Image (tube, rainbow, N blue to C red):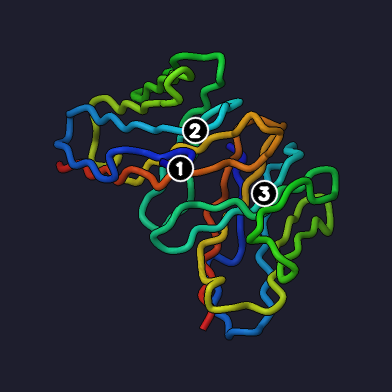
């Protein structure tokens, strides 16, 4: 898979359920960032987790990072219809580059 | 809360025409970026800008593209002679430092006919 690949590609759940999205990457990273994108709109930053961190929380969001497996997960607890969006992970590679490399995203549909 | 702004939100142009996309980054940020997202595809990096010069660019960012920070607030992306394949959503982003959060603007949807 390419740097920053999410799975599943699509996820449909009921309101109130938890949603888990995973991201895998290939190179060493400085940090990994999760973004949300509502259909055709801008990218909203959710959380940045650094390579020396294992878990971060922000409200109903929980992000984990396992650098040994080169993977991250985003958990949204008690989902709401308003959480319906595409979620992307983006890696800041430990190569001196400043570019973020985005995955293809997970399309989350939360049914009311 | 400060945010990145972009204008216009939509732009339609004819192939071969020049377009300028404008961005106002968050005021105390030092690093500026342009990305694009072709419909249905990944967000792709174009260029980063720091200390009034390009610090990195991708292979997409060829001679048809240029960036400028003409004053203390605006950051622009110019496409000199647009092609059909330049149709995409263009995002500006800014950050306080290297390896810090990049905050994205709402995007400019460019359609080249």
Q: Position of residue B51 (x, y in %)?
A: 85, 43
Q: Kindly indicate whether the residue at mark 2 contacts the one at mark 1 (C-beta within 8 angstroms).
A: yes
Q: Position of residue B98 (x, y in %)?
A: 71, 32
To the question of a shared chain for discs 1 and 2, the answer is yes
Q: Residues within 10 Å of mark 2 (few under 14, many from 20)?
A: some
Q: Residues within 10 Å of mark 1 (few under 14, many from 20)?
A: few
Q: Residue at x 30, y 46 (%)?
A: A107
Badge 3: chain ID: B
Badge 2: chain ID: A
Q: Residue at x 80, y 55 (%)?
A: B69
Front-most of residues B109 and A10: A10
Q: Please name the residue that numbered disc 2 is placed on.
A: A26
Q: Please name the residue that numbered disc 3 is placed on.
A: B33
Q: Quadrant of residue A70?
A: top left
Q: Quadrant of the C terminus of chain A?
A: top left
Q: Position of residue A103 (x, y in %)?
A: 44, 43
Front-most of residues B60 and A77: B60
Q: Is residue A69 above or below residue B56?
A: above
Q: Residue at x 42, y 21 (%)?
A: A69
């Amino acid at each position: 898979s390419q740097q920053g690949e999410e799975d599943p590609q699509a996820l449909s759940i009921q309101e109130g359920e938890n949603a888990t999205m995973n991201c895998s990457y290939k190179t060493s990273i400085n940090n990994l960032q999760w973004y949300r994108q509502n259909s055709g709109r801008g990218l909203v930053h959710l959380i940045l987790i650094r390579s020396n961190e294992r878990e971060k929380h922000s409200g109903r969001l929980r992000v984990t990072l396992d650098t040994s497996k080169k993977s991250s997960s985003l958990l949204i607890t008690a989902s709401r219809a308003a959480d319906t969006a595409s979620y992307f992970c983006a890696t800041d590679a430990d190569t001196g580059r400043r570019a973020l490399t985005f995955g293809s995203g997970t399309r989350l549909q939360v049914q009311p | 809360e400060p945010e990145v702004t972009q204008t216009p939100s939509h732009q339609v142009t004819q192939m071969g025409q020049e377009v300028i996309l404008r961005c106002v980054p968050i005021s105390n940020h030092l690093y500026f970026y342009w990305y694009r997202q072709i419909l249905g595809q990944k967000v792709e990096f174009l260029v980063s800008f720091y200390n009034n010069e390009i610090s990195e660019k991708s292979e997409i960012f060829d001679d048809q593209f240029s960036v400028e920070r003409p004053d203390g607030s605006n950051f622009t992306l110019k496409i000199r002679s647009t092609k059909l394949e330049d149709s995409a959503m263009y995002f500006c982003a800014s950050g306080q430092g290297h390896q810090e959060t990049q905050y994205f603007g709402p995007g400019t949807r460019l359609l080249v006919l």
